[in-house]
Amino acid sequence: MSQTYQAEDGKTRCRWCSFAPEFPAYHDAEWGFPVTDDQRLFEKLSLEGFQSGLSWRTILVKRENFRRAFDGFDFERVARFTEKDIARLLKDEGIVRHRGKIEAVINNAQCANEMVKTEGSLAAFIWRYEPDAKSLSEPQSASTSPESVALSKELKKRGWKFVGPTTVYAFMQAMGLINDHAIGCYVREKAAKARKTLKRP
């Protein structure tokens, strides 16, 4: 099956966009474009953790609820969440009410604060794992990579949770550490230009 499809607007996109009405806008404006903002990086890692065992659509449609529940994923604030906050979140029908995943976000926020102290920023640390373009396989043909395995291992070593290699690879795809838009997708060139002009942290 082709990795692309032609949408009703005449544009050729990655085929996964056809699976839900919420996907095209996310695909066109966000997915695969490089991100160096610490708060956005933390948000995406957190949401990828919540996605574990679920579909991305489930998370995407609840994203604004997650942002509200977790103070915009300001990890300095989330790191100070208490048992009272966990109890509040477990009653919040607008998010995924999974105690382990909620506790992981709070734990990871504390780890993120430590990382900023030691590395300068989350972005500075994460972008060290950007793979060499020459080493990449065909777009959308893998679910992990040596870099996602290495980043996952290091994050776990530093105390992060729900950051397995597949989760980390999906994070790297979304945050533009790789350009995994399918060959022929009209956004692939846009993402490539954004990566080319990016000032790495």
Image (cartoon, rainbow, N blue to C red):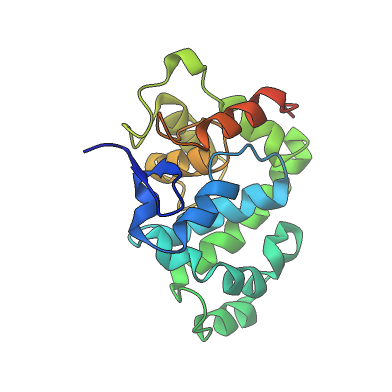
In this view, 22 is above or below 130: below
Quarter of the image that includes the N terminus:
top left
The answer to whether residue 30 shows anywhere in this view is: no
Q: Position of residue 188 (x, y in %)?
A: 51, 32
Quarter of the image that includes the C terminus:
top right
* Residue at figure coordinates x 34%, y 45% from the top left: 15
- Looking at the rendering, which quadrant does residue 73 occupy? bottom right
Choose between 42 and 12: the one closer to the eye.
12
Name the residue at the left extreme. Answer: 1
- Looking at the rendering, which quadrant does residue 21 occupy? bottom left
* Residue at figure coordinates x 49%, y 84% from the top left: 93
Relative placement, left or right, of 68 versus 19 is right
The answer to whether residue 114 shows anywhere in this view is: yes
In this view, 3 is above or below 114: above
Q: Where is residue 107 in the image (x, y as percent from the top left)?
A: 59, 58
Choose between 4 and 113: the one closer to the eye.
4
Name the residue at the top extreme. Answer: 134
* Residue at figure coordinates x 45%, y 33% from the top left: 180
Choose between 61 and 132: the one closer to the eye.
61
Q: Where is residue 194 in the image (x, y as percent from the top left)?
A: 66, 31
In this view, 188 is above or below 104: above
Q: Where is residue 69 in the image (x, y as percent from the top left)?
A: 63, 75
- Looking at the rendering, which quadrant does residue 189 occupy? top right
